[in-house]
Image: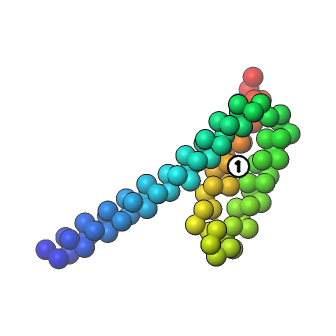
Amino acid sequence: MILVIIIDMRDKIMLQRALGSVWGMVLPGIIGVMLVLAGLSENALRTVIVLGLLLTPAMLYHKRLRHFILLPSGVALIGGMLLLLLNLK
């Protein structure tokens, strides 16, 4: 019985962590929408991608910012998707 309770508690914590990491892609998605509405050029989007890729390892080594590592990588990913969409047109 105790083992069942421990497993149940662990699954809830893991679900909360998974849902917490969703914000790592929702917030960059909102930023991506704002980038589209701003009408940035291809070179500006490339700059956003490079900055996101450079900030990711820098944030990994920072003690407090490592919890937000998905934000710059998510912005880089969404910027890359936007760049692909611009090239398809």
Q: Position of residue 12 (x, y in %)?
A: 32, 62
Residue at image point 69% right, 67% down: 59
Q: Position of residue 85 (x, y in %)?
A: 71, 30
| In the depicted structure, whether residue 60 falls above or below residue 22 | below
Residue at image point 36% right, 65% down: 13
8 vs 49, left or right, is left
Q: Position of residue 28 (x, y in %)?
A: 62, 47
- Which residue lies under the disc numbered 1? 76
Tag 1: residue type? Ala
In this rendering, does residue 84 appear at all? Answer: no
Location of residue 55 by image quarter: bottom right
Residue at image point 32% right, 69% down: 10
16 vs 71, left or right, is left
Q: Position of residue 51 (x, y in %)?
A: 78, 54
Q: Residue furthest right?
A: 43
User: Which quadrant is home to the N terminus?
Assistant: bottom left
| In the depicted structure, whether residue 54 falls above or below residue 48 | below
Location of residue 89 by image quarter: top right
